[in-house]
Image: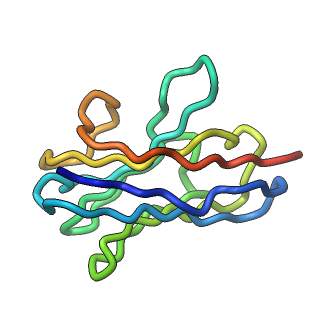
Amino acid sequence: QVQLVESGGGLVQAGDSLRLSCAASGRTSSRNVMAWFRQVPEKEREFVAGIKWTGSRTNYGDSVKGRFTISREIAKNTVYLQMNSLKPEDTAVYYCAANPLLDITLRVGDYDFWGQGTRVTVSS
């Protein structure tokens, strides 16, 4: 079993930066891939960024490329999402997710474990 706890959300202005954290616990092999998704009401959950726990390979959704950076700190079992140049359209609940697969996938259904979410609001 894997537990994921997100933190770092809040209210910021357009152009600001914010860093989300996801503290993970549980079997490492079950969280070989860690990712961030986001969701707004009445829309499907959207892939934001993913990282392999070993090797640090990353992947990003098109809407955040060049602005967001995903990283992990193995000693702290924590994954981060550094969000720069935030836009109002980045407003969403951000979820941390994990799966045991060999490579990063973008599909919600491939992720077995989810955090409770942290809300990010970007005002214009």
Quadrant, the C terminus: top right
Q: Is residue 9 above or below residue 116?
A: below
Count of marks overlaid on the render: 0
**Left or right for 7, reference 112:** right
Q: Is residue 117 above or below residue 66?
A: above
Image location of residue 9, percent across then percent down: 64, 56
Q: Is residue 111 visible?
A: yes
Residue 40 falls in image quadrant: top right
Task: Residue at 79%, 57% (x, y): give it.
Answer: 12
Q: Is residue 104 above or below residue 89?
A: below
Task: Residue at 34%, 31% (x, y): give it.
Answer: 108
Task: Residue at 72%, 38% (x, y): give it.
Answer: 89
Task: Residue at 28%, 48% (x, y): give it.
Answer: 98
**Left or right for 36, reference 40:** left
Image location of residue 121, percent across then percent down: 74, 46
**Left or right for 14, reference 86:** right
In the image, 5 versus 79, the foreground residue is 5
In the image, 85 versus 124, the foreground residue is 124
In the image, 110 versus 115, the foreground residue is 115
